[in-house]
């Protein structure tokens, strides 16, 4: 079976909520019953730190169980022998989620690939995820990156993923910077504009004031006019709530969890529909009864063919 899907999360400016959304989405999809892998591409280990203690991360780096070592192994042997070595199980509240963790030398590793003799350098993350057999072992793999300041990370994430989620804050600056990034991406990656844009979903995060809520419509309009009328902007937005900044940390209270559940639950419904469409992923979201019905349907078709 290799039915899993890969979602890339990237953004033009930093601090827009990529890591927060990666974690919440991973957690909610896991609770929904999917097997989830999170890939932390940020050398500042912000995502990994919400899953593992510092000592553990230092230990993983020392024992060569992090991203750079995985890439080294892939480049050296063209394959990865023991995939479990790089997939680290963790608990996020009630949910088991696996994480691939970066390390301090990760930027050097990427630079070495990028400026070295390797052909198809933009495929390095795709090749790595293929070697780690993520589509076989996880329903959904979510890649959390750093901002577009370093375009290499956005590029490899685009080549590795089936769909892209791009958070931005409800400010004109973020809208402009996101627009500029999206304008640049087709040329940068060599991927057809329409194909690329059809796989993108933009989500407003940290919506704080009623003025910002009103402005979202104007921003939608700018995005449609400046980028493409076909670009998808989520109807749901994520409000600026301190609960989101505490989730996953020791300060998180029951109330924080409840608030995040309430807000994110609505976004999740829209996410499932969007992701089903753009990543051809409806099979991931079928309930148990629908899954059985689908299997029965397939068997009947097969029977007909055999007869
Ligand atoms: N909806 C939100 N409400 C309140 N704080 C948020 C929200 N989303 C993110 N944050 C906080 O904003 C900061 C930046 O978010 P983060 O997810 O780290 O962004 P990025 O990964 O894009 O740099 C973090 O401190 C995070 O806890
Ligand atoms: Mg981050």
Image (tube, grey):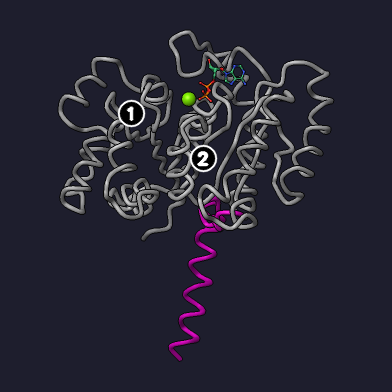
Magenta residues, as a range? 278-307
Say if residue 34 shows up in the picture: no
Mark 1 secondary-structure assignment: strand
User: Could you say which disc has been placed on residue 47 in the image?
Assistant: none
Of residues 42 and 289, the one nearer the viewer is 42
Q: Is residue 200 left or right of residue 60?
A: right
Q: Are marks 2 and 1 in contact (CB under 8 Å)?
A: no
Residue indicated by mark 2: 32
Question: Magenta: predominant secondary structure element?
Answer: helix
Measuring 37% from the left and 32% from the top, which residue is drawn there?
Answer: 96
Rendered-image quarter of ligand 1: top right
291 in magenta: yes
Residue indicated by mark 1: 90
Mark 2 secondary-structure assignment: loop
Measuring 80% from the left and 24% from the top, which residue is drawn there?
Answer: 213
Label whose residue precedes the other's in the sequence (2 or 1): 2
Measuring 49% from the left and 42% from the top, which residue is drawn there?
Answer: 8
Q: Position of residue 138 (x, y in %)?
A: 38, 47
């Amino acid at each position: 079976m290799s039915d899993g899907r890969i979602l890339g999360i990237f953004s033009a400016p930093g601090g827009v909520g990529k890591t927060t959304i990666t974690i919440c989405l991973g957690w909610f999809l896991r609770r929904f019953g999917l097997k989830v892998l999170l890939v932390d591409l940020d050398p500042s280990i912000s995502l990994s730190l919400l899953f593992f203690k510092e000592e553990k991360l230092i230990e993983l780096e020392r024992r060569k169980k992090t991203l750079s070592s995985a890439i080294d192994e892939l480049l050296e042997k063209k394959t990865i022998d023991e995939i479990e070595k790089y997939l680290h199980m963790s608990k996020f509240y009630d949910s088991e989620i696996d994480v691939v963790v970066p390390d301090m030398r990760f930027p050097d590793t990427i630079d070495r690939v990028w400026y070295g003799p390797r052909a198809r350098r933009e495929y390095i993350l795709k090749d790595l995820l293929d070697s780690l057999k993520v589509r076989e072992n996880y329903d959904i793999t979510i890649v959390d990156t750093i901002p577009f300041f370093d375009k290499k990370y956005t590029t490899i994430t685009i080549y590795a993923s089936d769909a892209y989620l791009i958070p931005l804050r409800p400010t004109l600056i973020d809208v402009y910077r996101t627009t500029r990034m999206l304008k640049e991406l087709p040329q940068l990656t060599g991927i057809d504009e329409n194909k690329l844009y059809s796989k993108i979903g933009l989500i407003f995060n940290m919506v704080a004031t009623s003025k910002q809520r009103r402005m979202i419509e104007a921003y939608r309009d700018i995005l449609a006019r400046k980028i493409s009328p076909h670009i998808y902007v989520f109807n749901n937005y994520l409000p600026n709530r301190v609960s989101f900044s505490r989730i996953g940390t020791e300060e998180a209270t029951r109330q924080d969890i409840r608030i995040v559940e309430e807000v994110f639950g609505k976004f999740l419904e829209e996410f499932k529909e969007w992701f089903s469409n753009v990543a051809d992923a409806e099979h991931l979201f079928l309930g148990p009864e629908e899954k059985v019905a689908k299997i029965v349907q397939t068997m009947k078709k097969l029977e007909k063919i055999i007869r």
